[in-house]
Image: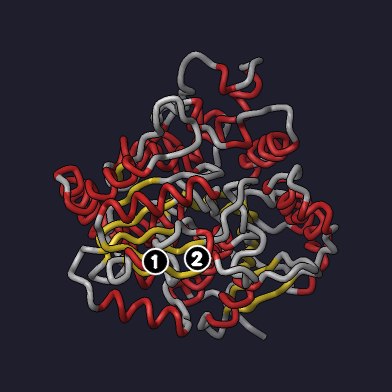
Amino acid sequence: MNRKPHVAVLPNLGLGHLIPQLEFAKRLVVHHGFHVSLLLITTNEPSPAQDQLLSSSHLPPDLHIVPLPPVEVDKKIINDGDVLVLTRLCVITDHSLRSLKSVLIALGKPNALVTDIFATQAFDVCKELLIPTYVYVTTSAAFSAFMLYLPKLDSDVNCEFIDLPEPIQVPGCSPIRTHDLLDQARNRKIDEYKWLLHHFSRLPLASGIFVNSWKDLEPVSIKSIKENPFFKQIPTPPIHPIGPIIKQEETLSVVDVECLKWLDKQPPDSVIFVTFGSGGTLSFEQQTELAWGLELSQQRFIWVVRKPTDSTGAGTFFNAGEANENDPKVDLPEGFLDRTQGVGFVVSSWAPQVTILGHHSTGGFLSHCGWNSVLESIVHGVPLVTWPLYAEQRMNSTMLVEDIGVAIKPKMEAGQQTIVGRKEIERVVRMVMEGEEGKVIRSRVKELKESATKALDSSGSSYESLSCVANYWKANHN
């Protein structure tokens, strides 16, 4: 019998949820002496990138993958463009967690369960089994504050939030411009908003909230959640900033090795890495403008190209890593690959992001601003050009530019709400790679790189924050 304290970790679908919670589970095992069961929500649909991640990760002996019984997903729901990403995710999760009680009993009732923000059904199961339940927030402390404030905002405001004349003032935090609101909060009549409000309203039921951030990165938001009277009266569970927790290892394909060999030959800080995370896609028109902008900038680049889609910016959320029959490169402007040969390196669908960001030749990152990508960039000291696509990414983008000071944001063309033009792309790429503003944000991100390292040291704020909870679990271990 394993006599170590036992914790179950329940991530949700999507690599953006799975990767940080897998790394969190590893830290509990390696640094704090726990036995961890990682509970996987599974469906009858393949998830190539998830399968590859789990098969290639070097899991420590006391970390065990426990797949929940697969959910039979109606293909009409998954492929229906009218059923949006969060609704699909929540419906699948709701079905999957019907088996949670029997799984936890079979595991011998762990000492605690750490669940995803969109899997709060676990609270009810664990309350019945007397298992303390914590939430792992895979995004920022600023967004955590918004999540906790949303129920109050919902009860106080009658109109759509995007119609409010002033920015939304989350108590003690930076105001949120209404056009930066995540898509799910821009229409209160849709199912996505109802799911959002449902799960966010239940966060106070948690025994604690883990946030993948650290004090130096978000001092104002973290202090506000801990000390502001509004959050105290909710009452907000204890918040534990434990970041930055990022992916530590990547398995390299033949194409990845070829890409890194090319990168080895480039001067230090000379290459901008362009990718939109595991789920991001662009429209055909926007992809064309991006290609021209990169070419006009005359900067070295690595670009992860996907098949363009006009339906949603999250076009590959549910099938990340899936082989595409058509080479996405065929959708680039005619002659682009020939004209940029030697200056740029174009790869299809996927690249080893952490390895590239950690390479000495990489000097900039054009990113969709998913929180994992943001943390990976900061940890490796790489300044950003922000290109938000979906979820809370517009809020992240504004925070990176205005509050943290490690990024530049392109401007839309006058009268154009959806397309960033090639001249603007040329401007911001040149600015981050060789302009004066680029030098300022590069200096700032290098400071935060050092701060991130210190936060995770054995005497650092994030290490101590996790140790505090780990020691409490150990003290209550039977």
- Residue 129 position, x and y percent, is 77, 59
Which mark is drawn over residue 337? 1
Image coloring type = secondary structure
Residue picked out by circle 2: 329
Q: CA distance from mark 1 to mark 2?
A: 8 Å
Looking at this view, name the residue that lies furthest to the front: 334
Looking at the image, tell me whether mark 1 or mark 2 is earlier in sequence order: 2
Residue at image point 74% right, 50% down: 88
Q: Nearer the viewer, residue 186 or 300?
A: 300
Query: Does residue 460 appear in the picture of this structure?
Result: no
Q: Amino acid at mark 1?
A: Leu
Quadrant where the N terminus is found in the figure = bottom right
- Residue 240 position, x and y percent, is 46, 51
Query: Does residue 353 appear in the picture of this structure?
Result: yes
Q: Is residue 215 above or below residue 247?
A: above
Which mark is drawn over residue 323? none
- Residue 323 position, x and y percent, is 62, 72
Q: In what element is the residue under mark 1?
A: helix
Q: Nearer the viewer, residue 2 or 357?
A: 357
- Residue 146 position, x and y percent, is 52, 34
10 Å crowding of disc 2: few (<14), some (14-19), many (20+): some
Residue 467 shown left or right of residue 100 in the figure: left
| Quadrant hosting residue 466 | bottom left
Number of dots carrying numbers? 2
Answer whether labels 1 and 2 touch (C-beta < 8 Å).
Answer: yes
Residue at image point 26% right, 78% down: 264
Residue at image point 38% right, 61% down: 376
Q: In what element is the residue under mark 2?
A: helix
10 Å crowding of disc 1: few (<14), some (14-19), many (20+): some
| Quadrant hosting residue 315 | bottom right
